[in-house]
Image (spheres, rainbow, N blue to C red):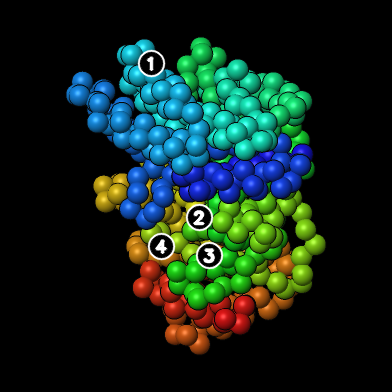
């Protein structure tokens, strides 16, 4: 059995919905279908979720909301018309939205979630109808009734462990199950949503609950690229990578999906396949628990700008018991998370996202480091980019770092820092933001001959 998830661009209009019907019915194993709200139909379009947020804001502000409501209804009406579905479908959607507004909770966050969830909920109803209309019986399943229980952190909810057992019974459905993504209900019966983009989470939870053979995540790319196609022309596609590789790559800029979104599938060791709704015959990218890596092979190189480093130097640091702990304690006290801590015998650096280090926090942290740790020198550097070279095959392969650093040296890039992850499946390099693209081109040549 396969759990299949279609993102917003794959369900944005009737044409896309017709494609997903074809995709699902082409494979009898595709039994559970998770759908997003209609996304953008073109570059400057607005996602239905954003229209719903605007509608909710208008209601909260006690303003006339008719136009905002009609903007949402209009999106579904276009789908209903183009798919030749009965007008009653739209009447039901409009009544549903008005009902949500009328029974509005005094808690604005709770009301916002009830409205946001309508995007997926209405789309799932329309899509189930469209499947059945096309001759493939499908049923809409309500997440609350199916047992998708979430914590009551509105807008940022997490699944409760007991959901899995309840959701497992979805595999018994005779018809194709159309399940709205992005939301569930709290124990108190209120609608709550995952963070934005959360339909991926719904898909991963269902895949884990029914122990699917594979979780297919349909989006609008043929496969995940080994490097950023905005910087490198035609980078090779990734056919297969492990969860660990994906995590390291998506951490530094790989935007296919949020790595946290797939945690349920990772825990249940369900392989994930990323595929293209607009080109379903392309094999896509598999993300698997384990694979037999080719010696010395790099699966991908990612990069992200916007990092800072705090460099601390103190003679005999290695003999000073508790130095590292006290240093990190300062960050903890100031509620700053860090990314890496490369160190030497007499020095230690902390790499962190610049967004976490406001000028005021920087001043406080540096003065505390000086006062409490008495270092010989502390320097802060901004505008750094992290470059991650990732591959399970790098494990125990000599010469990988040399190959990377030689490529950078030949390109005239000044390397600010190197860190080989303890997992040995990645190498991290820090360079100045201005050198990021040059570095990527040099590494692309060295590792992928592009
Ligand atoms: N519709 C929601 C959003 O735009 C969730 C999703 O598409 O995954 O964030």
Closer mark to the observer between disc 4 and disc 2: 2
Disc marking residue 302: 3
Badges 3 and 1: C-beta atoms under 8 Å apart?
Answer: no
Marks 3 and 4 sit apart, C-alpha to C-alpha, by 11 Å
Look at the numbered disc 1 and give the secondary structure of its residue.
helix
Mark number displayed over residue 99: 1
Q: Is mark 4 within 8 Å of ligand 1?
A: no
* Left or right: 356 as drawn, with respect to 30: left
Q: Kindly indicate the quadrant of the structure image that contains residue 31.
A: top right
Label 4 secondary element: strand
Q: Choose mark 1 or mark 2, whichever is in front.
A: 1
Element under disc 2: loop
- Neighbor class of circle 4 (other Cα within 10 Å; few <14, some 14-19, many 20+) is many
Q: Residue 215: x, y in percent?
A: 68, 44
Vertical placement of residue 361 versus 299, above or below: above
User: Between disc 3 and disc 1, whose residue precedes?
Assistant: 1
Query: Rounded to the nearest whole Å, what is the CA distance between mark 4 and mark 1?
Result: 45 Å
Tell me what residue is drawn at x 19 percent, y 24 percent. Answer: 63
Task: Name the residue carrying label 2.
Answer: 255
Crowd rating for badge 2 (residues with CA inside 10 Å; few <14, some 14–19, many 20+):
few
Per the model, the C-alpha gap separating discs 1 and 2 is 36 Å
Residue 315 place in picture, x, y as percent = 47, 64
| Tag 4 and tag 2, C-beta contact below 8 Å | no
């Amino acid at each position: 059995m396969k759990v299949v998830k279609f993102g917003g661009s794959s369900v944005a209009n009737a044409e896309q919905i017709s494609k997903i019907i074809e995709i699902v019915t082409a494979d009898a194993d595709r039994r559970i279908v998770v759908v997003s709200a209609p996304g953008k139909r073109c570059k400057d379009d607005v996602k239905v979720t954003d229209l719903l947020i605007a509608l909710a804001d208008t209601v909260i502000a006690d303003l006339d909301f008719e136009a905002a409501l009609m903007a949402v209804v209009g999106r579904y009406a276009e789908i209903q018309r183009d798919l030749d579905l009965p007008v009653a479908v739209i009447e039901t959607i409009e009544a549903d939205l008005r009902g949500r507004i009328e029974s509005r909770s005094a808690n604005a966050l709770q009301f916002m979630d009830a409205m946001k969830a309508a995007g997926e909920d209405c789309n799932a109803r329309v899509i189930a109808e469209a499947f059945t209309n096309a001759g493939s019986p499908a049923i809409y399943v309500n997440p609350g009734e199916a047992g998708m229980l979430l914590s009551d952190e509105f807008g940022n909810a997490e699944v409760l462990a007991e959901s899995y057992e309840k959701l497992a019974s979805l595999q018994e459905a005779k018809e194709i199950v159309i399940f709205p993504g992005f939301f569930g209900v709290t124990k108190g019966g209120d609608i709550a949503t995952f963070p934005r983009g959360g339909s991926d989470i719904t898909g991963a939870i269902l895949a884990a609950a029914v122990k699917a053979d594979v979780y297919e995540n349909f989006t609008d790319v043929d496969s995940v690229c080994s490097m950023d196609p905005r910087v490198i022309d035609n980078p090779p596609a990734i056919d297969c990578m492990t969860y660990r590789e994906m995590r390291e790559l998506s951490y530094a800029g790989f935007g296919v999906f949020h790595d946290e979104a797939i945690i349920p599938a990772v825990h249940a060791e369900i392989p994930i396949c990323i595929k293209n709704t607009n080109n379903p015959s392309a094999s896509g990218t598999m993300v698997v628990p384990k694979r037999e890596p080719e010696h010395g092979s790099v699966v991908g190189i990612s990069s992200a700008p916007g990092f800072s480093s705090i460099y601390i130097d103190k003679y005999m640091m290695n003999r000073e018991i508790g130095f590292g702990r006290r240093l990190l304690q300062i960050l903890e006290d100031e509620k700053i998370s860090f990314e890496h801590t490369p160190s030497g015998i007499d020095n230690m650096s902390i790499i962190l996202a610049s967004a976490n280090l406001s000028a005021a926090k920087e001043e406080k942290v540096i003065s505390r480091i000086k006062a409490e740790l008495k270092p010989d020198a502390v320097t802060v550097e901004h505008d750094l980019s992290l470059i991650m070279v990732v591959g399970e095959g790098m494990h125990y392969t000599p010469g990988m770092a040399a190959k990377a650093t030689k490529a950078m040296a030949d390109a005239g890039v000044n390397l600010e820092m190197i860190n080989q992850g303890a997992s040995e499946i990645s190498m991290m390099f820090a360079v100045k933001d201005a050198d990021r693209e040059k570095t990527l081109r040099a590494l692309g040549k060295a590792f992928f001959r592009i």
